[in-house]
Image (cartoon, rainbow, N blue to C red):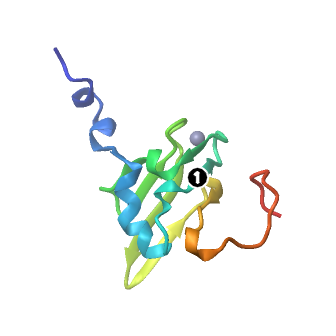
Amino acid sequence: MTDPVTLDPIAARRLDGNAAGGILAEVFAVDVTAARSRCAGCGATSMLGAHHVYADAPAMVLRCPSCTGMVLRVGMREGRILLDLSGSRLLEIPMPASSGGGPATEDDGELG
Ligand SMILES: [Zn+2]
């Protein structure tokens, strides 16, 4: 029997979104794997930990589990963190319980 992963070189490279938790913790002071992102391409909302991660490119790339569109890229260069969120229409990051919340917002998932 043939393993389908060996037939698909892209699938063979793919990790789950939790693989991005370490580098994203450098950017955000909270664990963002529980954050939810709305894909700018297809509109699907998924937890970052459920995204597909490609860590072998110059930047780590998170792709939408629904449409495989690029949602987020993060990399480090010359002492700086570069973050491209152009593929995420909205990123919802749960606040730590000890932070006491923040300003009240409407719960429609949109900003402003
Ligand atoms: Zn998508």
**Mark 1: few, some, or many residues within 10 Å (few <14, many ≥20)?**
many
Q: Position of residue 29 (x, y in %)?
A: 49, 75
Visible in this render: residue 51? no
Q: Position of residue 19 (x, y in %)?
A: 34, 55
- In the picture, measured across the screen, residue 16 lies left or right of residue 33, that is left
Q: Position of residue 94 (x, y in %)?
A: 59, 62
Ligand 1 is found in the corner quadrant, namely top right
Relative to 104, residue 79 above or below: below
**Quadrant of res 111:** bottom right
Q: Nearer the viewer, residue 3 or 10?
A: 3
**Quadrant of res 100:** bottom right
Residue found at x 59% / y 52% = 37
Relative to 12, residue 57 above or below: below
Residue found at x 44% / y 67% = 24
Q: Quadrant of the C terminus?
A: bottom right
Question: How many discs appear?
Answer: 1
Q: Of helix, strand and loop, which one carries label 1?
A: strand
Q: Residue furthest bottom?
A: 79
Q: Is mark 1 within 8 Å of ligand 1?
A: no
Q: Quadrant of the N terminus?
A: top left
Visible in this render: residue 105? yes
- In the picture, measured across the screen, residue 108 lies left or right of residue 39, that is right
Q: Residue furthest left?
A: 1
Q: Given the image, on which type of amino acid does mark 1 rest?
A: Arg
Q: Position of residue 11 (x, y in %)?
A: 32, 36
- The residue identified by callout 1 is 36
Residue found at x 61% / y 59% = 86
Residue found at x 79% / y 51% = 108
